[in-house]
Image (cartoon, rainbow, N blue to C red):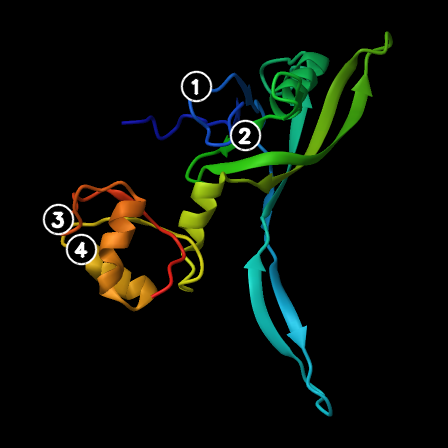
Amino acid sequence: MPDRGQLEHLRIEAYTKADYAGTPIATFEAYVNPAELTLSYEMEYDSGQGAGTTGSRMDFKKIKPGDLNLAFFIDGTGANGRPEDVQRKVESFQEVTGYNGDIHRPNYLKLMWGRLQVKRCVLKSASIAYKLFKPSGIPLRAVITAVFTDTADDQTRVALAQDSSPDLTHVRIVHAGQTLAALCHEIYGDPRLAPRVARANGLDGFRHLAPGTRVVFPPLEK
């Protein structure tokens, strides 16, 4: 059982694959946790207005990837009990969150802190403000203000969307008691499509599915 008095630091893990497979290649841990963390998201609509009308019809299109805004305070004076090497800590943040020449793009990130849901994201923007210097010019304090935006591989995005339209691809995880015919009725409105879905997924049969089976429901014509 974790120590209730133990300070848990915000942590960022870097991955090279969009599905976050394997172990992180690098980790950044904030010694001084952010005082504020802002989550923002936006809905996108198509606005349609009929001739001779004053209002508009807002047809839902999608939820845009959400943003997370926060600021890291780095202190090299020792006022917080442990002096940091400010420039080295800044470079560590840039290494973890920035461009990776091996994959020709910025790293894929997992951001986690306390009871917050683990956020899969990439760095959208960052600014570094140095606040205090030694006479020699060595920085003693810095604030990194960063914006992270949601990211997910294609399979995860489809599974999370779970749109109900039969002309879209759907992904379901089978629960105990569910049948392929019932799921086909739910998605396509036709349980007779179960054999075609079974063939599309390479299933030997469709009458008895083990709980936890991942099934892809492609667009099918009745």
Q: Nearer the viewer, residue 28 or 97?
A: 97
Q: Which residue is mark 4?
A: 179
Ranked by sequence position, the earlier of labels 3 and 4 is 4
Q: CA distance from mark 3 to mark 1?
A: 35 Å
Q: CA distance from mark 1 to mark 4?
A: 35 Å
Q: Amino acid at mark 2?
A: Leu
Residue 112 position within the rendered picture, expressed as x and y whole percent measured from the top left: 48, 33
Q: Which residue is mark 1?
A: 23
Q: Which residue is mark 2?
A: 109
Quadrant in which the N terminus is drawn:
top left
Position of 115 relative to 59 (above/below): above
Q: Residues within 10 Å of mark 3 (few under 14, many from 20)?
A: few
Q: CA distance from mark 2 to mark 4?
A: 36 Å
Ranked by sequence position, the earlier of labels 2 and 4 is 2
In this rendering, the label closer to the viewer, 1 or 4: 4
Q: Residues within 10 Å of mark 4 (few under 14, many from 20)?
A: some
- Circles 2, 4 touching at the beta carbon (< 8 Å): no
- Circles 3, 1 touching at the beta carbon (< 8 Å): no
Quadrant in which the C terminus is drawn:
bottom left
Residue 154 position within the rendered picture, expressed as x and y whole percent measured from the top left: 49, 42
Q: Amino acid at mark 3?
A: His
Q: Secondary structure at mark 2?
A: strand
Q: CA distance from mark 1 to mark 2?
A: 12 Å
The structure residue drawn at horizontal position 44% and vertical position 61%, both measured from the top left corner, is: 167
